[in-house]
Amino acid sequence: MAEPLGAAEHLTESQKTWMASLRANLEKETGRALEDWVAIARTCPETAHRARLTWMKTHHGLGQNRASVIFAQAFPAAEGEDTAQARRAALWSDPNGLAILQAVEGGLIGMEGLVIGQRKTYSAWSRKFQFAAMRPLKGGRARLGLAVPPDAGSGLEPADREGWSERLKASITLSAPAQVDADLLKRLQAAWDGS
């Protein structure tokens, strides 16, 4: 499977700032330094991410965000990029769906400050804010959400209850990579411009 846009960041600047703040305040708010929490995390008998988070909450009272930072530090390969790549591979296993994804990503090349976010059920793209997301559909199709109004072009419809950012107001169902044409790329660019 082809790699996603390799040079792109995976966190927005505001996400990086928030993560740095979370790390910086960990000792002050919990009484233990990150290194101490990492040592505790390595004693966790669980191997799945969600089970580890539950264990940390049950045994040490830490919420999901702090626990995720700690486990990412304790088990970097398991919690980091390898997991995002595995989610992407599992999500985009249909060859036509993957070809649509790659066509959309081809339109994103060169967008300065692009941030890729791979979720369990969709792929997302941000600059300061999320401007597009796409999830696979049955039959090798894909649903693309854009941070533009639904009346911004033909074929767009309201993005109701899609499960991605509420900023994505319009969506379109794509059945083939050829649908990622100049018109759709203009809408992608407009969504990026607004982010």
Image: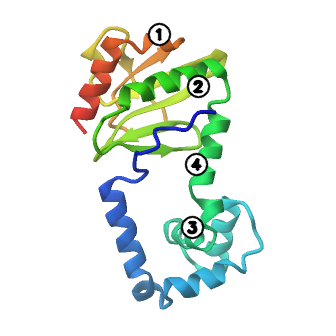
Q: Is residue 72 left or right of residue 182?
A: right
Q: Residue at the location (44% across, 11% down)?
A: 179
Measured Cα–Cα span from mark 4 to mark 3: 13 Å
Q: Earlier in the sequence, mark 4 or mark 1?
A: 4
Q: Quadrant of residue 60?
A: bottom right
Q: Quadrant of residue 113?
A: top left
Measured Cα–Cα span from mark 2 to mark 3: 28 Å
Give the amino acid type for the residue marked by disc 3 in the picture. Ala
Residue 63: x and y in percent read 53, 70
Tell me if mark 1 has few (under 14), some (14-19) or many (20+) residues whose alpha carbon lies within 10 angstroms of its own.
Answer: few
Residue on which disc 3 sits: 72
- The nearer-to-camera label among 1 and 3 is 1
Above or below, 42 against 161 in this view is below
Residue 91: x and y in percent read 63, 34
Give the amino acid type for the residue marked by disc 2 in the picture. Leu
Tell me if mark 4 has few (under 14), some (14-19) or many (20+) residues whose alpha carbon lies within 10 angstroms of its own.
Answer: some
**Mark drawn on residue 84:** 4
Residue on which disc 1 sits: 178
User: Which quadrant is home to the N terminus?
Assistant: top right
**Secondary structure under the numbered disc 2 in the rendered image:** helix
Q: Is residue 150 left or right of residue 133?
A: left
Above or below, 33 against 83 in this view is below
Q: Residue at the location (58% across, 38% down)?
A: 121
Q: Residues at badges 2 and 3 in contact (C-beta under 8 Å)?
A: no
